[in-house]
Amino acid sequence: MEKMRKNIRLTAFFLLLQATIMSYAQVVEAPYEVGTWKGFTEAAITYTFDDNTSNQYSVAIPTLNEFGFDATFYPVINWSPSWTNFQNAVDAGHEIGSHTLSHANLSELNSEEQDAELKNSQDEINAHISGQSCLTIAYPYCAPADDTITGKYYIAARHCQGYIEKSTPDDFLNISSIVCGTEGDIETADDFRENSDSAASLNGWSVYLLHGIDNDGGYSPVTSGVFRESADTSYLVVSYEDLSDEAMIISRAVSTGIPENANRSEVIVFPNPCNEVMYIQFESDGSPVSVKVIDMKGVLLLHETATAKKAEKGIYSINISHLPEGSYFLKIENSAKVFTDKIVILKN
């Protein structure tokens, strides 16, 4: 992932990786433990902000930075977002996702119009913001686009069903969030605390949906005082993309032989986006390399075993011509290393 972070990367995606980690837990004796969330906290919290209101820049981001929290901001492209402010936010560890070009009700648009809203908003963000890729979207009016279209461009989509998500959601293109502020279910500091405690009881993931702060004209505002009081450092607080990035985390108590995640510098996947063929350069110990491509719902679509005999100058070629356009998870592993990433397939 391109995004540069100040915090350790988080967990909650990749269903297959979860199964892999659980299999490690079954065969490796104590002192290893498998934690649902980093630091063995009981819940994960994500703050998301829609509509690029002014106090998101002047109040929310400084407060989040003070507490060391990463959040996700979803600007509407045609509403004149401050790219300078959002670049500063990314530099501080936050994420910028898409809230479409025009804040359209996507359910009222045809497929071509939906595609334009999703693709062009992503392109605009990627053109103005460096240090990350735009990989998540928040649907205006909680009205989703067609999953096939969303999956071409994004790894996760935020809805607003109002419930606390499981640690591994059933559908990453249909993740629940809870509306906060005067028009939502969470308005006071006590409401935030009660929700956090409920998430902890479920070992779940609570996604807060915020708009305005104080009197900046945003929908369903919360006060800056309540926003500050909502901070609860006993739980994991990270951006939407981070929680949608992998699956779980192994907390290592001592050093033994569990395979560790490979550093990204040890694996090169190109081109990305790709089309007919994907090339992988992977530092191998000589053992076979397993390559898996998995769709957004966790379905294994491709599994190949690459050996040294199949490699040319240490580069493996994988035929992906049979896979449709869209975003996928890539998992590469041998006897010593595991690497996970996201790939995008585009057809000419």
Image (cartoon, helix red, strand yellow):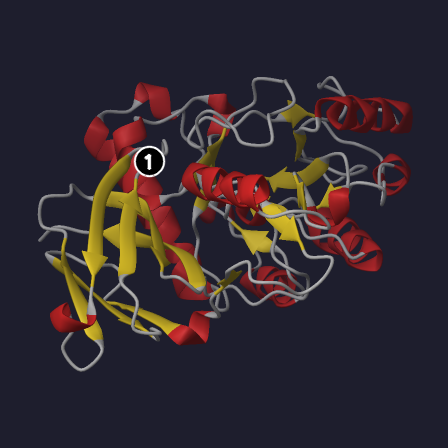
Residue drawn at x 39%, y 56% is 124
Nearest the viewer among 305 and 90 is 305
Using a 10 Å C-alpha cutoff, classify the residue at mark 1 as few (fewer than 14 neighbours), some (14 to 19) or many (20 or more).
Answer: many
Left or right: residue 329 versus residue 54 is left
Nearest the viewer among 203 and 35 is 35
- SS of the residue under disc 1: helix
Nearest the viewer among 329 and 179 is 329
Of the residues shown, which amino acid type is indicated by label 1? Thr
Left or right: residue 286 versus residue 98 is left
Residue drawn at x 85%, y 42% is 234
Nearest the viewer among 285 and 73 is 285
Q: Position of residue 86 (x, y in %)?
A: 59, 59
Q: Position of residue 22 (x, y in %)?
A: 54, 39
Residue drawn at x 35%, y 20% is 107
Please identify the quarter of the rendering in which residue 143 is found: top left
Residue carrying label 1: 150
Q: Position of residue 1 (x, y in %)?
A: 45, 61
Is residue 82 shown above or below 263? above
Please identify the quarter of the rendering in which residue 301 is found: top left
Residue drawn at x 65%, y 38% is 36
Q: How many marks?
A: 1
Is residue 243 shown above or below 197? below
Is residue 166 shown above or below 345? above
Give the residue at the far bottom of this rendering.
Answer: 313
Q: Position of residue 269 (x, y in %)?
A: 29, 67
Is residue 219 shown above or below 303? above
